[in-house]
Image (spheres, coloured by chain):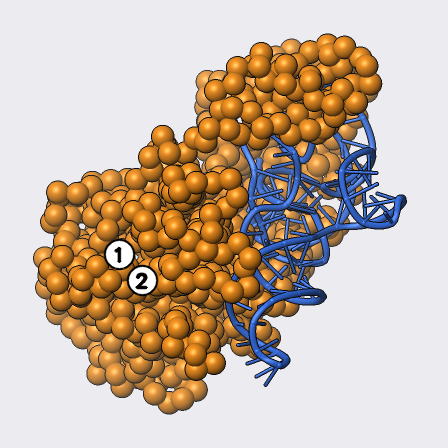
Amino acid sequence: MAEQDERLERYNPTEIEPRWQRRWEELGLHTTDLTDTSKPHYYLLTMWPYPSGDLHIGHWYVKTPTDAIARYKRMQGFNVFYPVGFDAFGLPAENAAIKRKIHPREWTVANMEKMRLQFRMMGASFDWNAEVVTCDPIYFRWNQWIFLKFYEKGVAYRKQAPVDWCPSCQVTLAREQVEGVDRICWRCSTQVTKRDLTQWFFKITDYADELLSFEGLSWPEPIRTMQTNWIGRSEGAEVDFTVAPAAHHAGGEKLRVFTTRPDTLYGATFMVLAPEHDLVDTITTPEQRAAVTIYIEATKRKTEIDRLTTKKEKSGVATGAFAINPVNGEKVPVWIADYVLAGYGTGAIMAVPAHDERDYEFAQQFGLPIIPVVAPANLAATPNDVPLPYVEKADGAAVAVNSPAWNGAAWPASLTKAIAHLTSTKTGEKKVTYRLRDWLISRQRYWGTPIPIIHCATCGPVGVPVEQLPVTLPDDVDFKATGESPLKTATAWLNVPCPKCGGPGQRETDTMDTFVDSSWYWYRYLAPKNELGPVDRKLVDAWCPVDQYTGGAEHAVMHLLYSRFFTKAMRDLGLIGESEPFTRLFNQGQILGADGERMSKSRGNVQDPDELVNRHGADAVRLFLMFMGPWDQGGAWSSSGISGMVRFLGRIWTLALDPHGKEPGDPNSGVLPEGQDQAAGEAAVRRAAHKALGGVGTDIEAFRFNTAVAKLMELANALFPYRGGPVAGTAAWNEAIHYLLAGIAPMAPHLADEMHSRVQAAAGISTSDPRWTSIHQCAWPTVDTSLLTESTRELPVQVNGKLRDKLTVSATATEAEIEALALASPKVQLALEGRAPKKVIHAGGRLVNIVG
RNA sequence: GCCGAAGUGGCGAAAUGGCAGACGCAUCCGACUUAAAAUCGGCCGGUCGAUGAGAUCAUGCGGGUUCGAGUCCCGCCUUCGGCACCA
C-alpha cells in the first residue's frame, strides 16, 4: 500500500477542489466585463433559485450542465455573462418565521449565505458581482417603480372579482397558479376556493395576441403549445338577442352572447345564462323566481370542482323569460345553467343543440327543440337525416341549411356570410375572445414587495410618489397567517397622509406576487446597483435578449409567460428595446427520488449533494449528473454509477500525471498495438483526440452532455493502451492529453485545471509564472479533419438487408472495386445461394447491400 | 375527451433511414496481492450450436413504405406531463 502511494499520488478531489475554487476567485475568472466589445457576447441565464436553505441534487442537475455551457463558451472565445441571484421573497421564509419566531429576512439571509457556499463547492462559474436579491430594497424599489408606471398606463388596475384563494397558504392566486381539474395550489397542492375580493391585476390580456407569436424564438415546441393553449384565442362573433316583452316585464334589454359558430344562428332554440349573469334577476318571471333562486343558491354552494366536472349531468332552470333571435325573430326560452361560465365570453350563450354536444345534452334532458342548420354536403337535401349533434365544420363540405340568409353556403363561407349579416343588421359583430385572464398580483402576506399605493377616502388609490420609493417592509409585524395581510398590524407604517390631498390615508397592505420579482431580473443583473432606473438601457441593448435560458418546464404558463409579458410592457414604457426576453430556451427534465416520486423531505427520498461531494468530489457528481441520460429527460435518482465517474477521473489523472507508467496486469502494456509502427501509433492517438473533441463540441452545443462525456471516455480508453509505450510523452501524445483536459474542463473543471497545471509544472511553468494559464483560459481545441481519415476502413456487407460479412477496404476504393470485393466474399456467395445479384446498393461508402 | 412527450439488455442509456445495444453501472473471469481493497485486462440481449465458426430471434403491439426501419407512415396498447362544459 505504501509503495503504491510512493509510485503515484492518488486523485484526491477533496484536496484539489477547494484550492481551485479559491484560485478562480483570485483570478477573477468569472467576472464579466460588460463593456468589453472585443469578443462576441453570450448571455447565459439559468432560472434563479429560491433560497430554501439547501441546495439539493435537483439544483445540481439544473445548474451543472448550464455551468458547462458557460465554461465551454468562454473557451470558444465568447465574452460570457453568467449571473445568478436569489428569488428571495416568498412564503417559505414567512412560514419559517412563524414557526421559529425569527424574522423572514434573517432566515433568508442565512440560507443565501449557505447556498452561496454550496454553489462555490459545486465549482459553479457564476459572476457574483452581478448578484441580484429580490428582498433587497435596492431591487424591489424598482418593482414598485415599474408598478407605478404600469398604473399610470392602465397596465396595473384594481377590481373586485371572484378570485382563487388557497386556504393553506392564506393568499389569493393568479389563475396560472391553480393547477389541473382538481384546482390545486401550485405551491402546496391544497385545493383552492373562491373569494370575492378587490385586488390588483396586471393587464396581460392586452398582450394576448402578441404573446401568441413566437417568431424568432428557439423555444421547445411543448412550451409554445402550452402557452398558446393557455392564451386560448378563439374567433367568433358577439350577437345581441333581445329580451321579449312579458306580462311582468317590458323587455327590450340586449342579451349579448359570444359564439364561435354564428353560422348556426338559425339553430339557436334557447339561451343559457350563467347563474351569476346580471340580467337573471330582472328577467325572471314570478312563476319561476322560486326555482331560479334555489338553483342560484345551489350553485353557490357547489365547489368549483363540482361545477367544472364534465362528467356530471347537466342541470338548469328556465327563467320563464324569452328572447328574440335576431336572424329570424323567433322567441326562444332563456334558461340558467351552471355549465355556462360567468367569466368567459359574455357569460351567456345561444344554445344550438343540433351542433354542440353540451347544448344537445341539455336540450335532450329538458325536452327543448333541436333544429339542424348544418349538414354534410351529401345530406343537405335531407337535413333531418343528419346524425346529431353534428359538430364538424368540414372545410367546404359542411353546408348551411334551414338558414334563409346564408342557405347553401359551405364552411367557412357560411361563417363569413353570417358575420356579414350580423354586421349589416347591427345585431352583432366579429369578436375574438381569449381564455387568458389578467394576472392577479395581490398577495395577503408579508414577505414580498409592498404595493406602492396609498388609499385615500377622497382620492381613492394614489401611487406613492417615486421619490419616496422604496416603500420598505416594517419590522413590527405580526406574521401569523390569518388570511388578512400581516402589514395591517403595522399601525405606525400603515397610516400616512394621502400624497395628493394630504388627508388621512392608509397604505396598501397586500404585497406583490413573487412572480413579479422574477419577471425582469435578468435585465437587472446587467446593472444591479443602478440608481437611475430599473435597468441600464445601454447594457440591455448590448446584451439582450438573453442568448440561452435554461430551467424547468413547470414554469411554462407562469414565469415564462409573465416574463414575456413584462418584456413587452417594459418595451412599451420605453425602458428596453426588445420584445422577447429569451432567444433560446431549454427545459431540462426533473430529477426524481429513487422511488420515482418527486423529491421531498416528507417522502424522505431527498438526495443530499454535500454528502456525495464529500465522498466522491464535485467533479464526479457534476459528471455523473450529465452522464446519466439526456438532460431534457430527467429521471429517478440512483447513485450507483457514480463510481464510474470517479474511475474515469482517476484514469485522466493517471494519463496526465504518469504517462510512462506500465500496467502490470495488462499484457499489452508498454508496447505498440500489433501491426502498428511508431508513426501509426502517434497518428492513432491524434486521430482519437481530434475525433473526440469534434464530437464533444457538437454534443455540448446540442445539450447532449451524456454523449459528450461518453466521447471523452472513449478518448481516455483509446489513449490508455499507449501509456508506458513509445508513443507516451511524444508531441502527439501531449497534444492528445491537452485535448482530453480541455474537453473535460467544462464538465470537471477542477480536475482539468489541476492536471493542466501539473503538465505546465512539468514543463517548468509554475503558477506564479506569467506564462501560466488556467485550462479555462485556453482556447477550445480545434479539430483538424485531415487527421480523421484512415487508410483503410471496415465495410459491412449485407445480402438482402442482412449483415453477412465485413470487408477491409482502402479508403480510396471505388464503388466498382468494392462491389467486386463484396461479390468475391465466400460468405456473400453462400448467402446468395448461387443467385445472381440483381442490384448492389452503396450507402455512401458506409455499407453495401447486395440484392439477389 | 383533447394536446404533447416517451416505451431499446439485469440497470442508466447510444444509434444523419445503413453493422442495434456506443459509453457507463452491476455480475462474472483473469492479472497484481499472503489476502482483500484499489488498479489493469477481459466476458457480458435471448435461443440453437458441446465450445467454436455460425445460424436465428430481438428496439411496447399489429400492419405498411423501402434494397434496408429503433428511426418514416397508418392503427392500437402502456406510462408520464399539460388542458378540460372556454360556447
Q: Name the residue tied to disc 1.
A: A775
| Colour used to depict chain B in the structure image | blue
Question: Which chain does the numbered disc 1 sit on?
Answer: A
In this rendering, does residue A655 appear at all?
yes
Q: Is residue A849 above or below residue A450?
A: above
A378 relative to A251, above or below: above
**Three-letter amino acid code at disc 2?**
Met
Q: Is residue A6 left or right of residue A240?
A: left
Q: Quadrant of the C terminus of chain A?
A: top right
Q: What colour is chain A?
A: orange
The amino acid beneath tag 1 is Ile
Circles 1 and 2 in contact, beta carbons < 8 Å: yes
Q: Regarding mark 2 in the picture, which secondary structure is present there?
A: helix
Q: Nearer the viewer, residue B81 or A387?
A: B81
Q: Which residue position is annotated with label 2?
A: A755
Q: Is residue A157 left or right of residue A61?
A: left
Which residue: 43% across, 30% down? A789
Q: Residue B34 at what x, y percent from top left?
A: 62, 81
Q: The disc numbered 2 marks a residue on which chain?
A: A
Bin the neighbour count of mark 1 within 10 Å (Cα to Cα): few under 14, some 14-19, many 20 and up.
many
Determine the residue positioned at 33% across, 76% down. Answer: A15
User: What x and y, as percent, mark residue A464?
Assistant: 18, 64
Image height of A388 relative to A167, above or below: above
Q: Residue at x 41, y 63 (%)?
A: A661
**Which of the two discs, 1 and 2, labels the residue nearer the N terminus?**
2
